[in-house]
Amino acid sequence: MNRRTTLAGHTYEFPALSDLLAKATPARSGDVLAGVAAESEAQRVAAQLVLADVPLATFLDEQVVGYDEDDVTRLILDGHDPAAFAPVSALTVGEFRDWLLARAAEGDEAAISGLARGLTPEMVAATSKLMRTADLVAVGRRTRVVTGLRSTLGLPGRLASRLQPNHPTDDAIGVTASILDGLLHGCGDAVIGINPATDSPTRTVALLELVDAVISRYEIPTQSCVLAHVTTTLRALEAGAPVDLVFQSVSGTQAGNRGFGVTLDLLAEARAGALELGRGTVGEHVTYFETGQGSALSADAHRGVDGRAVDQQTLECRAYGVARAFDPLLVNTVVGFIGPEYLYDGKQVIRAGLEDHVCGKLLGLPMGVDVCYTNHTDVDGDDTDTLVLLLGAAGCGFVIAVPGSDDVMLHYQSLSFQDVLTARQVLGLRPAPEFETWLGRMELLDDAGRVRDLAPDTPAAKALLAAALP
């Protein structure tokens, strides 16, 4: 279907839905790399005007990645809930944006969150392209997604964190020191999640056992995860390892997931295996997914109907459609990790982080963000400060933190444990409730409920150190 408009005496035509979505997207380097970006700001505005008039129902009938050739498209459309979609089914994309902002202004969280199973990734991607930063914050703040395993995540007024104790050789002492550092800073309520230096099943089991020993001895209400490939986690399950969460990076196309070495059936098998262990105390969410704008493009898996390239933000939202099918505890976009080819500078990273957060939550996902960047990207600490505070205001479920903001294994910059404390203090946010209670029991909080400024020889630090050292 051809869509066109005339703006300032020039006629703009968008021959396919994927072309319209791409041209309406705020500027980012990945779309330029893919050859789908708007050629001018005027063309971008024209595309946004046309997109605003597209009925939401169009996305149920017209796909950007074909139904017959892509199992992600089939998963999304076959799982669509018409009853959940009914309240907004007659709206256009622009009208839906206005509907969301009106409900956000009224504080009507139930109305927004209740749509999740009735929305498709393409619907929310299209709508976000018409939003400014403040719009993304307002809608994200009023979209509620609550999950749990041994801690409850996503409650209002809370900001959880993933404690990421990576080490370049998976050294037990080095990993343990980082865990201790994070716990003493009140971090780790979302998960203690390690990126292993190798994908060895033996090493994965050893790391799982190390973290589980710390969690078990001091009854810390959190969960562990070693972010190995899902096939490695399956082998760890077979070996009887203490697996809390099954992790996998996922993409928005079947070809992209093939590049990650996964299928939908494999993800279902791993989830079932983790559920059988029954390790939860407050819930049964046992999967954890990571995504990131540009992953499909980097794998040359970004093409849809008639071989047309699809913009990276729409494909990112389709990855959320994959994650949603497996009822996750956690999903996060590693927003600046892939590099400047996909998100060039701080402005693009900030925009992408907010888009990913709100789009994931609208689809019913417990979204977090790794507020991060690689050292060859035009991003700095001021940009990450801006993004984490905006995300905190927008009701982000969790962020990722590493010692000193420098991941020595993955060689990129993320948030520090101190950054999490700053965001909580400035915005009046607290950790997950079970973890907050544990911090109090361990005498790690002061009378005002803030994390204490602890010296290493305090009783709490000594106790944790004794528990953590292998």
Image (cartoon, rainbow, N blue to C red):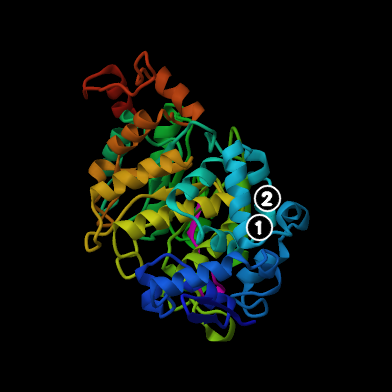
Pointers 2 and 1 in contact (C-beta within 8 Å): yes
- Under mark 1, the amino acid is Leu
127 or 4: nearer the eye?
4
What residue would you read off at disc 2? 115
Residue drawn at the location 31% of the way across and 30% of the way down: 185
Residue drawn at the location 39% of the way across and 43% of the way down: 390
264 or 209: nearer the eye?
264
Q: Is residue 44 a member of the stretch shown in magenta? A: no
Relative vertical location of residue 330 with respect to residue 279 in this rendering, above or below? below
- Under mark 2, the amino acid is Leu
345 or 2: nearer the eye?
2
**Left or right side of 51 for 194:** left
Q: Is residue 247 a member of the stretch shown in magenta? A: yes
> For the residue labelled by badge 1, is the local secondary structure a helix, a strand or a loop?
loop
What is the quadrant of the C terminus in the image? top left
Q: Please state the horizontal and vertical placement of residue 101, each as a whole percent of the image.
A: 57, 47
Callout 1 crowding tier (Cα within 10 Å): few <14, some 14–19, many ≥20: many
Q: Please state the horizontal and vertical placement of residue 241, each as a whole percent of the image.
A: 49, 47
Kindly indicate the quadrant of the structure image that contains residue 42. bottom left
Q: Is residue 364 visible?
A: no
| Span of residues in magenta | 246-256
Q: Please state the horizontal and vertical placement of residue 455, each as a whole percent of the image.
A: 21, 22
What residue would you read off at disc 1? 119
